[in-house]
Amino acid sequence: MWVACLIYFACASGIYGLGFWLPTIIADMGVKSTLEIGMLTAIPYAVAAVGMVLVGRSSDRRQERRWHFAVSAALGGLGLVLSVQFSNYPAAALAALTLATFGVMSASPLFWSFPTAFLRGAAAAAGIAIINSIANLGGFVIPFLVGSIKDATGSTANGMYFIAALLFGGAALAVVVRFADGRTVSR
């Protein structure tokens, strides 16, 4: 269960990191109008909404969760890294942020099939509550951490690299973790 907490902490960190910092990152790309920032911020979420449905359908059709989650989380991390690398090219940076949002938002619903693979009955209710509570500490930690990094360096770049590292770590854990009975989190 504690590993599931870590995996979802990584995913939730990506969600909160993008949710809180996406408008600031877009503004840092040189977009000055509040309306334009709002409109550009909507693009990644619109793509992610479609992506969530497509990834979910693919996962259901193949009856496979682990790799769908891992690839989605890794794409989220890759998108964050690329958004920093292309920060001087607004269109490319926005495309990378769209990839990041697609990946993170697609991974989140897939995660919830993991705890139900090894928790049953009352243990499932308590376990899911613990996983959700601990993982959602990312809602405090990540915005604070990225803000502190931005204050110290004048850039969100290192904060995005940190969130990307969490997402890559969460993806790796989802691939390699085996529970006490030998099952993986794949189904």
Image (cartoon, rainbow, N blue to C red):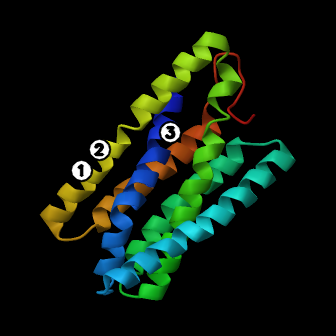
Q: Position of residue 32 (x, y in %)?
A: 29, 87
Q: Is residue 33 above or below residue 110?
A: below
Spatial CA span between label 1 and label 2: 5 Å
Is residue 128 at all visible to an observer of this figure? Answer: yes
Residue for badge 2: 141
Residue for badge 3: 8
Going by the numbered disc 2, the residue's amino acid type is Val
Nearest the viewer among 46 and 123 is: 46
Mark closer to the chain start, 3 or 2: 3
**Dot 2 lies on which element?**
helix
Q: Quadrant of the C terminus?
A: top right
Callout 2: few (<14), some (14-19), or many (20+) C-alpha neighbours within 10 Å? some
Q: Position of residue 94 (x, y in %)?
A: 47, 79
Residues at discs 1 and 2 in contact (Cβ within 8 Å): yes
Residue for badge 1: 144
Spatial CA span between label 3 and label 1: 18 Å
